[in-house]
Each structure stands twice: as C-alpha cells, then as structure tokens.
Amino acid sequence: MTDNTPDEHEAAELVRPYVITRGRDLPSEDKFSLITLVTTASDQRQRPNRLSPEEQQLLDMCAGGYLSVAEIAGHTQLPLGVLKILLSSLAEGGYLITRAPVPRAHLADAQLLQEVLDGLHARFG
C-alpha cells in the first residue's frame, strides 16, 4: 500500500475534471446559466455507448422532465464548470434540449386593477 502525498492528491483532483470533460472548454456564459432548463431529446434510442458514465448519468437524470442546471449540479455534485461542459457536449450531440426559463411576468397596472375592483363592487355590491 502506498501513501499519497498531498501533492499527488491535489494533482489527482485537478486531473479528474480534465478527464471527465476530455479537455473541452466551457461554453459561453449565456448558454447555460444556473436557471437554464434541460431535458433529454425525445428520441433516446440512438444513445451511443461511447458516452462517459457522467454523461449517461446526466441523460438518465434529465429523462424525467426539465431540470435546472442548478438542480442537476446539486444531484450530481459535479463542479459547475464540468457540468456545463458535459451539458453543452450532450446538447451539441442532439441528446439534450435546453430552454431558457420563462421570463418574469410584467406586473399589472395598479390603476387598472383598482378600476376592475371598483366595477365588481358596483355590479355585485
């Protein structure tokens, strides 16, 4: 049994994400924010066997419906940068569908709401 020095342990922690991502770069920031929604493409029969275990796990996880990038990161405990790289690769391969979250609704005009309320009171007492 060999003792790992702190330098060897630190090097192993740095190498693993590089191996998982196969050395790919991060996608652009606007492509995968924490609230970007992700699900699998409808046709999963063509899922190749050459995907990494992490990519297979992501596809299995996203098969149930839309999950946010933040939720996926919490479930997988992968570093966010590594996760974004894997999601980007799967999306480019056609295995994942991404969707920006629904934009925040505009607030209704308070004066209009008051007029509706006044009209209801006048009509129904």
Image: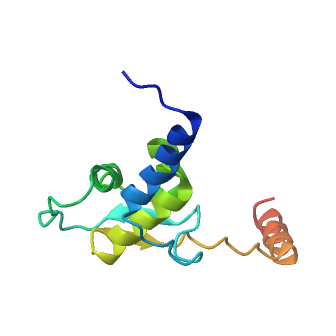
Residue 56 on image: x %, y %: 27, 53
Residue shown at the point (55%, 56%) measured from the top left: 80
Q: Quadrant of the C terminus?
A: bottom right
Q: Write the residue at 23% across / 59% down.
A: 51
Question: What is the residue that sits farthest to the left in this orientation?
Answer: 45
- Vertical comparison of 79 with 75: above or below: below
Q: Position of residue 111 (x, y in %)?
A: 88, 76
Q: Position of residue 110 (x, y in %)?
A: 86, 72
Looking at this view, name the residue that lies furthest to the top: 1
Q: Is residue 68 above or below residue 8?
A: below
Which residue is more in the foreground, 10 or 115?
10
Residue 95, how many percent across, how many down? 27, 68
Is there any visible trace of residue 43 in the rendered image?
yes
Residue at 59% in and 61% down: 34
Count how many numbered circles sit on residues in the image: 0
Relative depth, front residue between 14 and 97: 14
Residue 66 appearing in the image: no
Answer with left or right where residue 53 lies relative to residue 29: left
Quarter holding residue 47 = bottom left
As rendered, which of 5 and 96 lies closer to the eye?
5
Q: In the rendered view, tell whether residue 114 sits above or below residue 4.
A: below
